[in-house]
Amino acid sequence: MSTVGASWGRFPRAKQKVLAVQYRDQPIPHVNGYLLPYGNGRSYGDCCLNDGGTLLHTRKLDRFISFDPIQGVLRCEAGVLLSEILELCVAHGWFLPASPGTQYVTLGGAIANDVHGKNHHVAGTFGCHLMSFELLRSDGRRLLCTPREHPEWFAASIGGLGLTGLITWAEIQLKRIENPWLETQTHRFSNLDEFFSLSEISNRDYEYTVAWVDCAAEGKSLGRGLFMRGNHAPACAAVPRDYGRRQWAMPVSPPVSLITPLTLKAFNWLYYHRQRQPVTHALTHYVPYFYPLDSIRNWNLIYGPRGFLQYQCVIPPTTAQAGIAEIMGRVAASGRGSFLAVLKQFGDRPSPGLMSFPRPGTTLALDFPNAGESTFRLLSELDEVVANAGGAVYPAKDARMSGKHYKHYFPNWLKFQDFVDPKFSSSFWRRVME
Amino acid sequence: MRKVLIIGATSAIAEATARLFAVRGDELFLVARNPIRLEAIQKDLEIRGAHEVATAMLDINDLNRHAEVLDAAWSAMHEVDVVLIAHGTLPDQKACENSAALTLKEFNTNATSTIALLTLIANRLESQGKGTLAVISSVAGDRGRASNYIYGAAKAALTAFTSGLRQRLFRSGVTVITIKPGFVDTPMTSEFKKGLLWAAPAQIAKGIVKAIDRRQSVVYLPWFWRSIMFVIRHIPETLFVRIKL
């Protein structure tokens, strides 16, 4: 079956065959051309696409294998969604040790992109909590990978973008919680300097920190926003029984992007001024706290048929303040600023992954409606800024960075090449290796 | 807590249905051919909350072992509240047209062997004096079509058989449900181009559990297939032979 597939950003499009893997004992199918494991398609750009090749659909590999509710160790197949893990574990008092901004990614995808979350400054990446997994190579070999067994394959596959083979199952160490709620605070800050000092203080006492930034604001207000920090609620907290679940959906893709310079400015202004007090406190359920965008199904359709481009970079601590200011300044000046701009300070806990994106420094995530040439030009400019500052751009969100920049950001690519399965490739990989 | 016996437990629809039972804390007895896959599903259902999960291997065409497997199920659970018959194959229609042996083999798997097993199960439920027997037939059994009539004929046999069984067992308090799914996105249909009429196994599973809870008789899944098949059944034969279906 041949399908026209798109990733979450709906750019680029790719034409590829799709084969579903139903059971973990199945061998890798023999096909002409390249294979690529595909989970739930939540990567933004082309690292989950395989134009002209075949996608190995892994969502049917969605069985739990073992769960120890005393130690919090869970082993399951790679196609299980993080939402399904949470559904099982939260009731037993366990939580994901690290979680991205959507719970609709597969376990395999979380490993292949070595995802991170609001607790990176204390917990590191998802890969830091991985105990073992099985890697199935196209030659039929099944490698049990742990930090001690096949450690080089363990390292290469964490953040390995699915290129080292098919991860069939994995085992993770969960984190203890007392209840599904978090004690949260939102601080208004009026510029970048305030963000950095708030971050500095908060990262000591708060497990989760992240900031939303108004990227339409310029000059004195450059980098103003809302800083959100929180901790899991203690056992003694009086928590509600449930939260108000609300599910919205984008019914169709509008013919043009609804995100324009005007709506953007208005939204950002309103969002910033929504909070009147400098600080607010709340008790928030984990679903709306960690996954606010999941409550709008298909929110990605808002950008219209041309899709959108995400841009996430990290700038090392020594150049962070200047680098982030320069990027935000260029984005604000371009007038095509981002609907959702997210700032966070990464910690220095190293990931076991050879090709992981997170590293000490400050990360900024932006999204841009695909307006063609001008968008690409702006992003290429940002690539230069990031490269000069000694930073990196996140492959899971990328659809356009040059091979030159990729190799500069990820100098381990040479070493990594030896671990790429000869039958595996992706649109992303061919693009940056050209 | 209910006690549920599932034949063909590694099929996608059966597995999705078993998960719904597991979440409710039911006790399960799973029967299928492949022991490795059976074990994978058993572990998964236990973690999802099933009270207990036991398994047995069976090739449905191995008629001599039917009684033995049912004995095992009944002795493990003492009483069985729900039996779900979910095994089946989708024959290669073109290959069957050129081979009587293959045609009979496929017909045996989907109809004859199933009827043999149903005969034994029906008697056990009858003597129990309670229980629900849900059998997955297909919309394909409503009318034979050129593209799929070996499968259709086997499912038509199941539909008629379960209809009669329903009438017979009604007196002893046993419910017999004929389940007729339309197009379902499963490994059995991986070669097909999917369109609007296709449903996911999880969606069909919900319909099956609902039908069992409500003790329905004949259910089309999803519901709109009842109207589609009504139209298809009522096309006059003179016209029907001229259209491609």
Image (cartoon, rainbow, N blue to C red):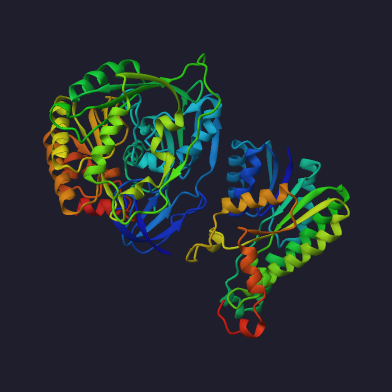
Q: Give the tally of numbered discs.
A: 0
Q: Is residue B183 left or right of residue A95?
A: right
Quarter of the image with the N terminus of chain B is: top right
Residue at 32% x, 43% y: name it.
A160
Q: Is residue A144 visible?
A: no
- Residue A199's x, y, as percent? 26, 21
Q: Place residue A217 in its image quadrant.
A: top left
Residue A135 appearing in the image: yes
Residue plotted at (60% across, 73% down): B148
Q: Could you say which quadrant of the image residue B146 lies in?
A: bottom right
Q: Name above or below for residue B180 compared with residue A312.
A: below
Work out whether B151 lies above or below A224.
below
- Across and down, in percent, residue A163 comes to 33, 48
Residue drawn 72% across the image and 46% down it: B213
State the residue in front, B236 or A391.
B236
Above or below residue A26? Residue A227 is above
Q: Nearer the viewer, residue B44 or B163?
A: B163
Residue A137 lies, in percent from the top left, at 39, 50
